[in-house]
Amino acid sequence: LVNVNLKGAMYLTKALLPRIIGARHAAKIVFINSVAGLPTWTIPGESVYSASKHGLSGFADSLANELRTHRITVTSIHPGGVDTPLQERAGAPADVRASFLGADDVADAVEYVVDAPRA
């Protein structure tokens, strides 16, 4: 989980950041995090997942401060449960999944952030 949820985002950012900074224009970086990356979310049995998402929150916050002078904003989106095939394979009951967000809801949130005017 740490390799995908935290290190994957860090390595991809490291690979792309020189080109983003080098472009010398305003840009936005959006991370898809989880409600598990917020301080109020503590579900027993999810400590490693939660730790990976808290790490991503910390990385995004630190990166936002580092990149501010380059006119690059960094945003984390923290959705709750998202109904994906992974949830079904993990055995989440259909009635529980029915209350989850859809992947298109998360995509809409990303679009909103990307299209929002720079503050």
Image (cartoon, rainbow, N blue to C red):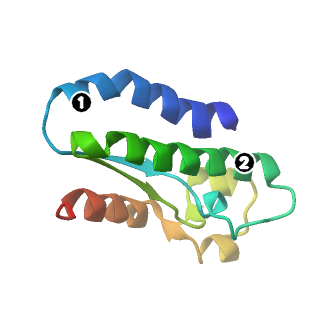
Looking at the image, tell me whether mark 1 or mark 2 is earlier in sequence order: 1
Quadrant where the C terminus lies? bottom left
Image coords of residue 20 (percent x, y):
24, 31
The residue furthest right is: 44
Task: Look at label 1 and name its amino acid.
Answer: Ile
Left or right? Give the position of 24 relative to 74. left
Q: How far apart are marks 1 and 2 (CA)?
A: 29 Å
Nearest the eye: 90 or 4: 4
- Classify mark 2: residues with Cα within 10 Å, few (<14), some (14-19) or many (20+): some
Q: Nearer the viewer, residue 87 or 53?
A: 53
Residue at disc 1, secondary structure: helix
Q: Nearest the camera: 81 or 64?
A: 64
- The residue identified by callout 1 is 21
**104 vs 42, nearest the viewer:** 42
The residue lying at 48 percent from left, 50 percent from top is 61
Residue 108 picture quarter: bottom left
Question: How many residues crowd around disc 1 within 10 Å: few (fewer than 14), some, or many (20 or more)?
Answer: some
Count every numbered label the image shows and give the total.
2
**Looking at the image, do the residues carrying marks 1 and 2 touch, with CB atoms under 8 Å apart?**
no
The x, y position of residue 86, in whole percent, is 63, 50
Q: Which amino acid does label 2 sit on?
A: Ala
Q: Which residue is drawn at 15% across and 29% down?
A: 23
x, y percentage for residue 72? Answer: 26, 44
In the picture provided, is 44 more to the left or to the right than 12? right
Q: Quadrant of residue 83?
A: bottom right
Mark 2, residue position: 51
Residue at 53% across, 53% down:
33
Question: x and y percent of residue 111 in the render?
Answer: 27, 60
